[in-house]
Image (spheres, rainbow, N blue to C red):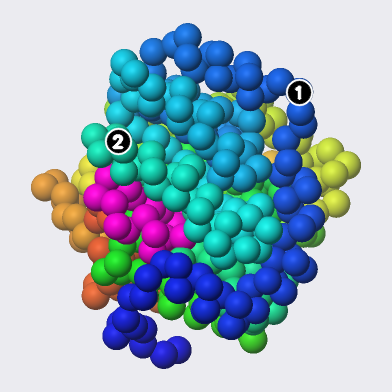
Amino acid sequence: MSNHQSRKKKSLYIFICILLPAIGIAAFLAAGLRDRTADSLPPADGKMAAELAQLSEGTYDSVLLSMHSSRYFTEEDFLTYLGQTAFVASRPLSDVEELSPYLDCALGTGSEISHVYLCLDPGLLWEAAGKDAKRWQSSLTDHLYSYIRKHPGVSFEVLLPYPQLDYWLSLSSEQLDALVTAYRTFADGLYAYPNAKIFFPGSQYWLMVNPDNYEDTLFDANELITQKLFLLSFCDAVYQITPENEDACWNAFRETIDREREAPTLYPDLSDWCLVFFGDSIFGNYSGSFSVPGYVSGLSRAVTYNCASGGSSASMGTEGFFDFPNVIDVFFTENRLILNDDRQILYPDEFEKDDVSSKELCFIINFGINDYISGAAIENPADPFDIGTFKGGLRHCITRLRERFPQARYVLVSPTRLGVVPQRQAAALTDYIRALEELSQEMDLYFIDNYHDFIITEDNLSDYLPDGCHPNEEGRLGMAVRIMDFMEDAVR
């Protein structure tokens, strides 16, 4: 890829009038956006009038308007995470002109609005402008830039679309060039205003690659993902693009799409497997499609159950309700197990139902970090099944599972390297890793060593473990890929 750091900024009008036609954006938009525009046009049902009435009658700190579904942007999240009373419009905008009625109402005399959040689609905006550069520029000036300029004390934060990978791959190189140019041109127009911010999470591979991150359309993320993007964009500004980082952002995005087009990443087909995950916060602190089990399910089509819980250990602690021995005891004695996802109930006979019984059953077990942090003894030589020890707890639990599910496979997954060192240590972390390997040999289990052989190394801890312990989205995706590849190569 060429380096665009030396690219000279031209006027926005010239950029649109000359560069966009030169790379064929009109052809792209004619071919690729007409259907989306038709689908996005809202019905003439008086919805706008009703929302404007609600907006004018209420007292709000912020407003969110979107060209795609805003269903999962909740007023509760704005209040909880930003301390703002928000008005979230449910009616999708069809063009930039439809911003004006909302902004006139929200920012009128006496308004207390301090933030305007906009989910805008540059491709749809260009289509709505009739693919005409003058109309595009005029519409943005009249219905967006003028409000940003007139209200310098109001923060305007724009979130660009983040469609699924399949959408980007459906475009030709010329169409992709045209769309990226539209995105960049739109962003360039906002950089001139100090009270405007723009975010683009759509370049993130962890987001676009998993089809289960989306629902209804290739553009609409599910509830958990939408909340995650809300936090990472509007709250933490992780995905903000600026004149200083835009070249790196767009170049990385293009490289990802070009790589996937030329050599698509193929994930194993595990649709004939049912995978049950036990573990600590590495599996359990996340639910849905961007947890480790969620990635495995979305990319391999395996049936997955996430039974992990944050703070749990393989050894039984004094207050270890979610520690492995107690979880297994509840599983069998009370005939139920609370799942991580929405706290659903999993029953042991679930695996005997028609849609699951035909699948191969495998338990994926990941413990060790909390045993290490709490200083749990690795083993009691006098009692190999002492559940107060690391190996004893694992022996006890796996033995009980095997008695009930003798045909199942069992995979032990080690902790990764960590960036934190606990004050209390009964042994080094590597001693717990070694114990897992020894137990896998003793009990004829499978073993994945994520400490010595994984993408997370001593040199890149901060890239994957923001808090020194828990993997971020890229780290969890990497862990899921490791498990899928291991299932394909070693367990079959």
Residue behind mark 1: 45
Q: In the image, residue 216 lies at what x, y percent?
A: 73, 44
Residue found at the very far bottom of the displayed protein = 2
Q: In the image, residue 66 lies at what x, y percent?
A: 56, 39
In this orientation, does residue 44 appear? Answer: yes
Q: Secondary structure at mark 2?
A: loop
In this orientation, does residue 257 appear? Answer: no
Q: Amino acid at mark 2?
A: His
Is residue 431 rendered magenta in the image? Answer: no
Q: Nearer the viewer, mark 1 or mark 2?
A: 2
Q: Is residue 92 left or right of residue 88?
A: right
What label sits on residue 151 in the rendered view? Answer: 2
Q: Residues within 10 Å of mark 1 (few under 14, many from 20)?
A: few
* Residue situated in front as seen by the camera: 32 or 225: 32
Distance from the alpha carbon under mark 1 to that under mark 2: 31 Å
Q: Amino acid at mark 1?
A: Asp
Residue appearing at x 26%, y 69% in the figure: 244
Q: Is residue 126 left or right of residue 36?
A: left
